[in-house]
Amino acid sequence: MKIIKGDASLILLALIIVILLLGIVFSAVTFRSNPVMDALASNRLLNVLYVIEENKMPVSAYVLMYYSATKRAAIFDIPGDIGLLLPKINRYDRIDRLYEPNRLSSYQNEIEKLLGIEINFSIIITKENLVSVIDLLEGVEIFIPSPVSYRDENGIVLFPSGMTILDGDKASLYATYSLPDEESDMKSFRRQRFFLSFLNRQIERNEYLKNPDAAKLYYSLFKTGMNQRTLAYLYDEFVNINTERTYIYSVSGTLRQVSGQTLIFPHYDGALIKDIVRQTLGSLTRDVEDERTFTVEVLNGTAINGLAGRTADIIRGFGYDVISVKNADRNDYSETVITHFSGDANMVREFAEIIRCRNIRSEFITPDEIEENMLNQSSENRADVTLLIGRDFDGRYVTGN
């Protein structure tokens, strides 16, 4: 069959058009299949569940919340011993009993209900793969406040104090070890600091991880529903996170003995942690230049012992820095009063909403007073807010206004 020159040109043109159309379709499908880009385009938060796993159970679990428009993030620590009613067996047990490495839905759903949010993505890394990841990152820098020395089945384990760079084996051990006599708060603090350091190292090495060979190995070490391109795009966004200003909130509660084990039942049937999440989301999405932490003084103006301390714990949960907890000048105050000195009306409203207090007073410090306080080395630093607890406070909310 003889093909004339004009026909050949038409066939070539048709092939070029087909290739261009296929390219357009492929690009459109690829864009639509990137859920991170979809979330950013619709101005939604990125909520990511991170799990460090050992023997098919979570050693640590965190939910990282990130808002692209303000470049801010917050992290919630999800202890494995949170108590909840398991519908399948109709009894109370640990939340991590629901964990299945290849089927996260039940475990993730309970975390979503606990925090009152929707989790967009999940990333799981086993203890074994954590070693390879950190070695690929050329170690992780961690501040260890005091030296650690203990013996396990493999021998003596030593961690020096101070700022140190741990390789994969050491870092994996630091992130997952547990001492029989270690207080739970110290264990949580250590693992939280590790997670922040690990996240920071991933951010620092993000450009290196764009090398095709490094990226292929790196992303193969995570278990996630995201493909490599989506996961890489997620970490491109996380480069904007300032880990030094990223606060980790712990889900706290009341300890109870259930079926021979100690479980954490979140305060006020979970209402407190949901309130903390809501205020955190508000702070992440609010476009303000001042990101400093406001300081609080708590005064107990009642005869109830320990009320100021318990209230301070609630306030710290919302990210405020409680610098003083003590008794007021008397214990018969009928009303709870918030006095603020910062002049930031938005901050005071948010703070007052924590305990639903409407009794707010303002006291502004003059420049002369500021200079006098700076010169007077013996004077205490004044908090931005003083909370005076009265009899109308029930331990969670002010009921009389």
Image (cartoon, helix red, strand yellow):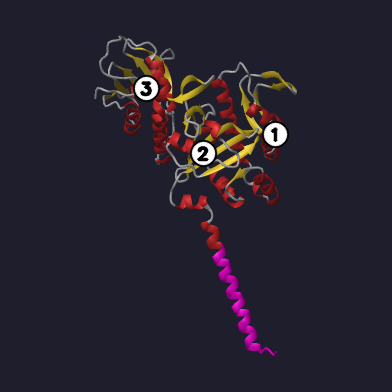
How far apart in space, not on screen, are marks 1 and 3 (Cα)? 49 Å
User: In this image, 17 relative to 131: left or right?
Assistant: left
Q: Secondary structure at mark 1?
A: helix
* Span highlighted in magenta in the image: 1-26
Give the amino acid type for the residue marked by disc 1 in the picture. Answer: Gly
Between disc 2 and disc 3, the foreground one is 2
Position of residue 355 measured from the top left corner of the image (x, y, whole percent): 33, 26
Quarter holding the C terminus is: top left
Please tell me in which quadrant of the rendered image residue 365 appears: top left
Q: Which residue is mark 1?
A: 168
Residue at (35% x, 15% y) in the render: 299
Going by the numbered disc 2, the residue's amino acid type is Ser
Relative depth, front residue between 142 and 99: 99
Camera-nearest residue between 181 and 343: 181
| Image spot of residue 349 (x, y percent) | 32, 31
Q: Which residue is mark 3?
A: 370
Q: Which mark is residue 106?
A: 2
- The quadrant in which residue 163 appears is top right
Secondary structure category for the residue under label 2? helix
Q: CA distance from mark 2 to mark 3?
A: 54 Å
Identity of the residue drawn at 63% across and 80% down:
12
Q: Is residue 19 magenta?
A: yes
| Position of 7 relative to 308 (above/below) | below
Q: Main secondary structure of the magenta part?
A: helix
Q: For the residues carrying marks 1 and 3, which lies nearer the camera in this image?
A: 1
